[in-house]
Structure formats: structure tokens, C-alpha cells
Amino acid sequence: MFKISFYVPSTNFNERISERDFILRVAEIEILFTNLYGGATADKSVKQGRYRAADGEVITEDVIVVSSLTEDLKKSQLLPAIEELKKEWQQESLLIEIQTVDDVLFI
């Protein structure tokens, strides 16, 4: 079993987007994960991240993490969708975290 987590950015490159657009991005990932993996959970507590852009500028942005559990990562469907969002959202990169989960109970 895998836990896949997507860090939804609140910027278009280094420009902050509106709160409405940020929430729409989160919903877009929730829908993508639900379609691919059968469900999704968004941790609506906003986190702050930083990274160094290719031009050396340090970008600070809020992120919301959307996660799903799955037996099959479906990379052939996931990666093209993420590449499209990367272009649409004007991102140098997007963070997807994949963890192996040994013990999961669905009751």
C-alpha cells in the first residue's frame, strides 16, 4: 500500500494567487486523486514552504497537502496530469511524496 501526497502551491511561479483560485487547485487535486485512487483527503491546515528557483530567487509559498492511499500508483495516468498542471500553474516543479505504508486498517 502507498500513501501519495501532493503539495498544492499557492503561487503562479512567484506570484501569489487568490484564495479562491488556491481552493480551486486543492479541489482539482482532490478530484484527480478520487478519480485515480477512489478517494482523497485534504489537510486544510496551510503549511509554508520555500524553495530556490532556477534563477536563484527564494520563493516562499503556502501549500495544502492532498493525500490518498492506493495499491497502484497509476503513474501512467498521474504523471501526464501533473505535467499539465505544472504548465497551467506556471511551476518549475511540483512536489509529490510517495510513502510505503505497511499497516492500514479500513473498518
Image: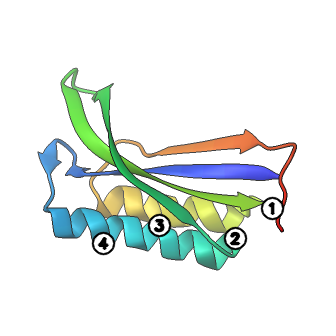
Dot 1 or dot 2, earlier in sequence: 2
Q: Residues within 10 Å of mark 3 (few under 14, many from 20)?
A: many
Residue type beneath disc 3:
Ile
Residue type beneath disc 1:
Asp
Q: Residue at x 87, y 43 (%)?
A: 102
For the residue labelled by badge 3, is the local secondary structure a helix, a strand or a loop?
helix
Q: CA distance from mark 1 to mark 2?
A: 8 Å
Left or right, residue 20 beside residue 28: left
* Coordinates of residue 54 in the picture (x, y in percent): 29, 27
Residue 24 is tagged as: 4
Q: Residues within 10 Å of mark 2 (few under 14, many from 20)?
A: some
* Coordinates of residue 87 in the picture (x, y in percent): 34, 59
Judge by depth and name the residue closer to the eye, 21 or 52: 21
For the residue labelled by badge 4, is the local secondary structure a helix, a strand or a loop?
helix
Left or right, residue 41 beside residue 102: left
Q: CA distance from mark 3 to mark 2?
A: 11 Å
Residue type beneath disc 2:
Tyr
Judge by depth and name the residue closer to the eye, 21 or 58: 21
In the image, residue 50 above or below residue 21 = above
Residue at numbered disc 3? 29
Q: CA distance from mark 1 to mark 3?
A: 17 Å
Residue 72 is tagged as: 1
Q: Residues within 10 Å of mark 1 (few under 14, many from 20)?
A: few
Residue 37 is tagged as: 2
Residue type beneath disc 4:
Leu
* Coordinates of residue 15 in the picture (x, y in percent): 12, 47
Question: Quadrant of residue 85 in the image?
Answer: bottom left
Q: CA distance from mark 4 to mark 3?
A: 9 Å
Dot 4 or dot 2, earlier in sequence: 4
Dot 3 or dot 2, earlier in sequence: 3
In the image, residue 95 above or below residue 41 = above
